[in-house]
Amino acid sequence: MSDWQGALCCEVSLCPSAAFSAERGRVVSVSKEKKDTVEKEFEGFPDVAADLINALLYQGREVTGADRLLAGPTETIYQGRERLRSQYEDLCKYELRGGRVSAMYLIANQSRVDGRMLLRKAGYTGGVYREQYEGKTKEIFPVVELVLYWGRTRWKGSRSFRELFRKKELPEGLWEHVDDLQLQVFEMRYLPPEVRERFRSDMRIVVDYLAEGESYCSDRKIVHKAALVKLLRALSGDGDVTDTEEELERLGIREEDEVRVCELFDQYTRKGRREGKEEGRKEGRREGRREGRKEGEARRLVEDIDKLRKNLQLSLERACEVFEITTGSYEEAKKLLRG
């Protein structure tokens, strides 16, 4: 291992967990920690990370590649009120050129709109630059952050310091002396076709699925099968995907197999139908497993929101915001339970 590898090599610890369903509109409570882990696992593959950078920052031009990216530390230290504190980014990649670090890319995943995300970015990037200033890295290099926003509501948070401080009463000419930090947010559920077409990795499957829903089908070959299925399940609202590898094994699908999107989706659909019939016979329901799952999800959603309102004294509107759903979706869930 060379000196720069020893100085920089700090792999991100990843552990799979979350879930995939063609029912894109499902509303359930998903563990944020599990969902974040699934997103990190998928984006951590070098080909996917390089694809994100090229497609979103460089209009699809192959500026960087999987062989140029090295996993970097996701933790930086800052001075708190009384002691040093840690802050973590979701993913960090060094870009190497000629055996030297040329740039650092930070990738942050967001499921909710954060109006002060700019200040968090300033902390992340500032922490890296501080380490460079203090000589903790052998090189100095620029830091670029991408924010991947996976929420269903559109992003309305500030994307620049000018937007963030727009309501402040400031003296004339002040902005000439203020660094206008920019936040590069990409709404992954709402990428236009011309942007989605830039992707070459399995991320193309993800963004097309989010845009087209359950009607989506493609002949694209899947590279990272288990990680892809976990992410699609998580983004569809499933809260536990620890059984993904077992499910793929039962379907006879291995990571080394050549599998296309439509083939995988078809196998999952047929599996769901078989399970639905079996559950329907057991419970005596005509609509089978699918309706049973919807009712169970609706019950969990209503119970979670009601508990949140009771414990934190929140209004219905605020509680629904926490779960990233509308009050209408909550009322629909209650209506489903009433039959």
Image (cartoon, rainbow, N blue to C red):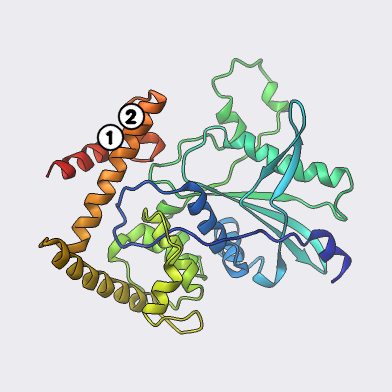
Rendered image: mark on residue 317: 2
Q: Nearer the viewer, residue 298 or 2?
A: 298
Number of numbered discs overlaid on the protein picture: 2
Above/below status of 77 relative to 222: above
Residue positioned 45% across, 48% down in the render = 31
Q: Quadrant of residue 301?
A: top left
Residue positioned 45% across, 72% down in the render = 245
Disc 1 target residue: 327
Q: Quadrant of residue 331?
A: top left
The percent coordinates of residue 59 (x first, y second) are: 56, 60
User: Left of 107 or right of it: where is 11?
Assistant: right
Name of the residue lying farthest toward the front: 282
Instruction: Say whether disc 2 or disc 1 marks the residue closer to the N-terminus.
Output: 2
Evaluate whether residue 309 shows in this view: yes
Q: Nearer the viewer, residue 323 or 182?
A: 323
Q: Quadrant of residue 268?
A: bottom left
Query: SS class of the residue under badge 1?
Result: helix
Callout 2–callout 1 Cβ contact below 8 Å: yes
User: Left of 221 or right of it: where is 81?
Assistant: right
**In which quadrant of the rendered image does the N terminus lie?**
bottom right
- Disc 2 to disc 1, how far (Cα)? 6 Å
Above/below status of 293 relative to 331: below
User: Left of 328 or right of it: where is 95?
Assistant: right
Check disc 1: other Cα within 10 Å, few if <14, some if 14-19, many if 20+: some
Above/below status of 180 relative to 24: above
